[in-house]
């Protein structure tokens, strides 16, 4: 099974869900992906870790009762020094939504709003390095920035995280770069300026793997979620854009490898 033993600087290393209904979200994701859910206790504010088998694959936190933020997934990028990265990000035009804070003996985190308006997390590992399994059914398979300011986004992530973008396409119809540390492409940046509705800001999008996208999309509907974009085929696989029962959006992406843990999903 694909495992991640090391986390490289600038690489997506974690994703978590901020939800207004943790109980409903727990039921939805555990039944859809075969995850189990483990509560962290009061020390970490009731944070929930989703696992596939014995590997950590995602997290979840309840929204404050008076929050007006929509439920959403957040992608975290690995850094070696959260404070220095926040300072560099601020100099490069980002807003700081949450200053660096230490999370027990797990690591240090911060949250930014990049110059194109997309929220992104930072994670400086101490004992917790992030995803335990990737690139298979029931795990994260891709992370993508959908941005309304493509040029500014490229400049920002190059400057702050040292990424070297590789252009996949550069036309008005489809402008996309893949990026990642050490030439290993693990993230995409998509020029969504002509595609996103006016009310939808730039955002990071999480892709979660399944072996059968059409069946998984039907299951999303059965579990109270919404299929926002019916399954479509591309040269990279089959995908469907969906939302969980409270509106948090993610993408189902096809993978060839079924995980043992997914074979008996309810």
Image (spheres, rainbow, N blue to C red):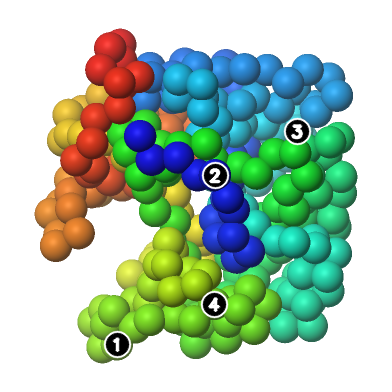
The answer to whether the residue labelled 1 contacts the one labelled 4, judged by CB atoms less than 8 Å apart, is: no
Q: Earlier in the sequence, mark 3 or mark 2?
A: 2
How far apart are labels 1 and 4 at the CA level? 18 Å
Element assignment for label 2: loop
How far apart are labels 3 and 2 at the CA level? 34 Å
User: In front here: 130 or 247?
Assistant: 130
* Picture quadrant of residue 211: top left
What is the number of the mark on residue 64? 3
Q: Nearer the viewer, mark 4 or mark 2?
A: 2
Q: Which residue in the structure is indicated by mark 4?
A: 163
In the displayed structure, 153 sits above or below 111; it is below
Q: Which residue in the structure is indicated by mark 2?
A: 5
Q: Earlier in the sequence, mark 1 or mark 4?
A: 4
In the displayed structure, 142 sits above or below 246; it is below
Residue 30: percent from left, percent from top: 44, 19
Count of labels shown? 4
How far apart are labels 3 and 4 at the CA level? 34 Å
Q: Which residue in the structure is indicated by mark 1?
A: 170
Q: Is residue 168 visible?
A: yes
How far apart are labels 4 and 2 at the CA level? 21 Å
How far apart are labels 1 and 3 at the CA level? 41 Å
Residue 4: percent from left, percent from top: 50, 44
Element assignment for label 3: loop
């Amino acid at each position: 099974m694909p495992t991640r033993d090391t986390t490289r600087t600038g690489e997506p290393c974690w994703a978590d869900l901020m939800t207004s209904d943790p109980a409903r979200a727990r039921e939805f994701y555990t039944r859809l992906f075969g995850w189990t859910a483990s509560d962290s206790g009061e020390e970490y504010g009731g944070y929930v870790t989703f696992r596939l088998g014995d590997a950590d694959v995602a997290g979840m936190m309840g929204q404050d009762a008076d929050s007006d933020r929509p439920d959403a997934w957040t992608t975290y990028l690995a850094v070696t020094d959260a404070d220095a990265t926040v300072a560099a990000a601020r100099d490069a035009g980002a807003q700081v939504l949450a200053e660096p804070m230490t999370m027990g003996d797990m690591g240090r985190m911060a949250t930014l709003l990049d110059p194109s308006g997309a929220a992104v997390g930072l994670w400086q590992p101490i004992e917790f390095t992030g995803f335990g399994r990737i690139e298979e059914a029931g795990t994260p398979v891709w992370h993508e920035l959908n941005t309304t300011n493509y040029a500014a986004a490229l400049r920002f992530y190059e400057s702050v995280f040292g990424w070297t973008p590789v252009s996949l396409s550069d036309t008005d119809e489809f402008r996309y770069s893949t990026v990642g540390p050490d030439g290993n492409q693990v993230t995409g940046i998509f020029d969504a300026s002509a595609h996103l509705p006016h009310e939808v800001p730039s955002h990071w999008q999480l892709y979660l793997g399944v072996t059968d996208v059409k069946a998984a999309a039907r299951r999303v509907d059965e579990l109270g979620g919404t299929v926002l974009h019916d399954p479509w085929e591309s040269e990279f696989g089959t995908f469907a854009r969906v939302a969980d029962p409270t509106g948090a959006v993610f993408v189902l992406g096809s993978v060839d490898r079924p995980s043992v843990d997914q074979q008996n999903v309810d």
